[in-house]
Image (tube, grey):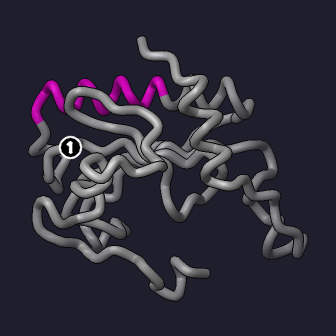
Amino acid sequence: MAYIQGENKPADASSGECPFCRIPREDDGLVVRRGALAYAVLNLYPYSPGHVLICPYRHVADYTDVSHAESDEIADLTRQAMRTIRAVSGAHGFNLGMNQGAVAGAGIAAHLHQHVVPRWAGDQNFMPIIGRTKTLPELLDETRALLEAAWVAD
């Protein structure tokens, strides 16, 4: 509800001020992996437990503007995230994606970020709406500890 109501939701900002520029500098407790050019951080408003964002350190909005080295590391961290999440939670599948621009649904359009969303059979489909049942959440600190401890680099 905090996300829906806009509480503490960061707005797009200039380089150095946007949340994805600040997170790696502030040693945010939700970062689960740091690379040379990009990092993996738990989504503060996850769609499911283990929802990770892969972000370049550089403040860049458009995927066509990342360097080859940055796109390679984003891809590597994405594969590592999938392996790690699958190992600790037995995810059945994943939604991967980047929303490019506000009209495409990017909540923070000024800084590129790729979503890695674990999915399980029957997880978020009809449960809250039709079944009037909520799925069990996992606290972010617990998810972070599991992923950080199990993360294996290629």
In the image, taking residue 77 as reference, residue 43 lies left or right, namely right
Quadrant position of the N terminus in the picture = bottom right
Q: Classify mark 1: helix, strand or loop.
A: loop
In the image, taking residue 21 as reference, residue 7 lies left or right, namely right
Q: Position of residue 30 (x, y in %)?
A: 48, 49
Residue 71 position by quadrant: top left
Nearer to us in this view, 34 or 96: 34
Q: Position of residue 138 (x, y in %)?
A: 72, 53
Nearer to us in this view, 25 or 34: 25
In the image, taking residue 131 as reference, residue 64 lies left or right, namely left
Residue extending furthest front?
Answer: 26
Nearer to us in this view, 23 or 106: 23
Q: Position of residue 84 (x, y in %)?
A: 58, 26
Tell me what residue is drawn at x 88 percent, y 69 percent.
133
Name the dominant secondary structure of the magenta segment. Answer: helix
Tell me what residue is drawn at x 28 percent, y 76 percent.
11
- When the figure is inspected, residue 92 is found, relative to residue 125, above or below; the finding is above
**Pointer 1 local density, CA inside 10 Å: few below 14, some 14–19, many at least 20:** many
User: What segment carries the magenta color?
Assistant: 67-80
Where does label 1 land, which residue?
57
Residue 9 position by quadrant: bottom left
Type of the residue with mark 1: Tyr
In the image, taking residue 121 as reference, residue 131 lies left or right, namely right
- When the figure is inspected, residue 7 is found, relative to residue 66, above or below; the finding is below
Tell me what residue is drawn at x 43 percent, y 16 percent.
153
Quadrant position of the C terminus in the picture = top left
Residue extending furthest top?
Answer: 154
Residue 46 position by quadrant: bottom right
